[in-house]
Amino acid sequence: MCTICRVSHHRNIKNVKNAFLENKSNIPASISHEDKKILEDYSFKNVIKKPEHIGRIARMILPKSSLWQPGRKIKISFVGGKKKINEKVKAFAKEWLQFANLEFKFITDPEDATIRITFKPSQGSWSAVGTDNLSFGIDEATMNFGWLEHPSTTEAEFRGVVLHEFGHMIGCGHEHESPKNGGVPWLKKNAYDYYMSTQGWNKEEVDEQVFDVYSKNQIIGTTLDKKSIMMYAIPNWITKGDFEVGWNYDLSTSDKTFIKKTYPKT
Ligand SMILES: [Zn+2]
């Protein structure tokens, strides 16, 4: 399972600022005029006039999206990792670029990169989402692959996890947290048992990684897409009725359509 990394309050506020500076449409036009002024003061002048304004910016976290400006060149660097593995990551990641008007530039110096990829087995696989990557320090990883080097990892799993984490990096959230069609019909008690025992998460982490529902502008497509690369595999016994999702290793049709629309070719 992939976790979107947990963020501190301080970083959350920075995420709002970075999303706004990169692409104005990341902040819904529906926020109040006053909130917009507060955000502009913070983003352009680094000024927060009153302590309560921090809370007001924090409330923009959920409706915000984290999309790059179409055409953005994103610098990426590996921090460690075997050459052969790194080359495979690059090759699979680039599949997104057939549909997204973005550029991935792989460079050697992590300090000059926006995306820093590590391979720590203890951390599982995760990535920061879209412009949230800009809030990380140059000594911090923004993406981690926990099991790519493991001999039991199949080619399909390798490809699936690379596409999934790079999906986060270009701004996609988890499809299982989509509210569309009423979302996944979780049987919550079983789902807590399952994720707590298989992932070692506590209840709060399950809430955060599985049940928290995104705002509608952060997610792919118009209906819940069981084939999305951003969807978790979900066993039948943790849902109501006859709902389950298998492992997805490829971009689905709506993944491709969504990302084409999000990052159009000019
Ligand atoms: Zn994920």
Image (cartoon, rainbow, N blue to C red):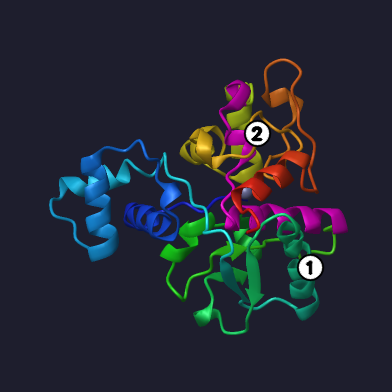
Identified at 54% across, 32% down, the residue is: 211
Q: With respect to residue 82, does 66 lie above or below? A: above
Which labelled disc corresponds to residue 134? none
Q: Please provide percent x and percent y for residue 56.
A: 25, 43
Amino acid type shown at disc 2: Tyr
At x 52% / y 71%, what residue is drawn?
114
Instruction: Verify whether residue 79 appears in magenta.
Output: no
Residue that protrudes farthest toward the bottom in the picture: 109
Indicate the amino acid at tag 1: Ala
For the view shown, which residue lies furthest in the left direction? Answer: 50
> What percent of the width, then of the height, locates residue 227?
76, 37
Residue highlighted by disc 1? 91
According to the image, label 2 marks what residue?
Answer: 194
> Is residue 81 rendered to the left or right of residue 19?
right
- Mark 1 Cβ inside 8 Å of ligand 1: no
Residue 107, percent across and down? Answer: 63, 81
Q: Residue 142: horizontal and vertical position, in percent?
A: 54, 65
- Between 29 and 123, the one lying in front of the other is 29
Q: Is residue 176 visible?
A: yes
Q: Is residue 24 above or below residue 143?
A: above
Rendered image quadrant of residue 221: top right
Please name the predominant secondary structure of the magenta segment in the image.
helix
| Labels 1, 2: front one | 1
